[in-house]
Amino acid sequence: MNFSKIKSDFELNFKADNRWKYLTSGLSNTLKITFFAVLLGVALGVLVAIVRSSYDKNSSEMKNGLGKFFLSIANAVCKIYLTVIRGTPVVVQLMIMYYIIFASSRNSMLVAVLSFGINSGAYVAEIIRSGIMSIDNGQFEAGRSLGLNYVQTMRYIIIPQALKNVLPALANEFIVLLKETSVAGYVTIRDLTMGGNIIRAATYSPFMPLIAVALIYLVIVMFFSWLIGILERRLRQSDH
């Protein structure tokens, strides 16, 4: 192994002109996009999950009227949203948002957060909906017997239990979203992957910058996987 060649390649790709800063600034942008997209995705996912599960649980028992009509419309909109978002690639959604819907805006970070958040919301919605549907109907009846209406029962009894059940799956969705942000460079965002590409284009040396990007992603994913493992053990212990 030619260590002098490795050293010179390392200095060319990272030390020369402080090119390592492309990776650190790119990592910062990647984490920012992921964090805010997760917040948006969870908020949107909870809303869609409540609409979908409420329709599934109550539509057959509801009397015809405005309440059932609006719930049916909301459920239809949510189903279309889930079908479209889950049926198209995230990179295509990102480019549609940037080049068509927000063509007049040049705030690519905001567009990326919206795109990844909306995409993540579709998957979060199904995760949370499965958690809500897994709660026994006796919990709803218990809430009613305590004098709570449907909204209060969902807020204080059902949603907390459902979130606890699906928390590991939600944490895994965070990891998936972190890796999906690697396509943010399609809308000129200098994320971690784009940082590696900038170095590669400047040095004509693809090996080290791309391996460095891969290793950084790997370390981050391993770290969050470790945290998820701790979370799952805590949840199992709290069940006993």
Image: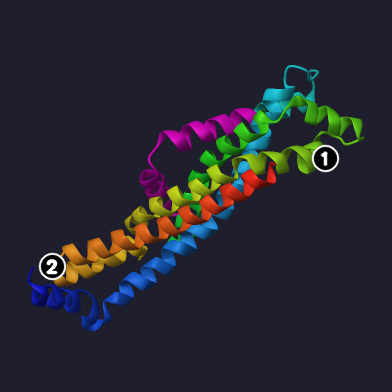
Q: Residue at x 57, y 47 (%)?
A: 232
Per the model, the C-alpha gap separating discs 1 and 2 is 60 Å
**Which residue corresponds to the image point at 83% horizontal and 27% vertical from the top-left?**
141
- Check whether the beta carbons of the residues at disc 1 and disc 2 lie within 8 A of each other: no
Question: Compared to 133, does 115 lie above or below?
Answer: below
* Mark 2 neighbour class, 10 Å CA radius: few under 14, some 14 to 19, many 20 or more: few
- The image quarter containing residue 7 is bottom left
**Mark linked to residue 152:** 1
Q: Tag 2: residue type?
A: Tyr
Quadrant into which the C terminus falls: top right
Residue at the image point whose x is 43% and y is 54% from the top:
178
Q: Is residue 232 visible?
A: yes
Q: Is residue 76 magenta?
A: yes
| Residue numbers of the magenta segment | 75-102
Note whether residue 104 is visible: no
In this rendered view, identify the residue nearer to me: 96 or 9.
9
Tell whether 239 sits left or right of 226: right
Residue at image x 49%, y 51%? 174
* Relative to 61, residue 31 above or below: below
Q: Nearer the viewer, residue 33 or 6?
A: 6
Q: Nearer the viewer, residue 96 or 125?
A: 125
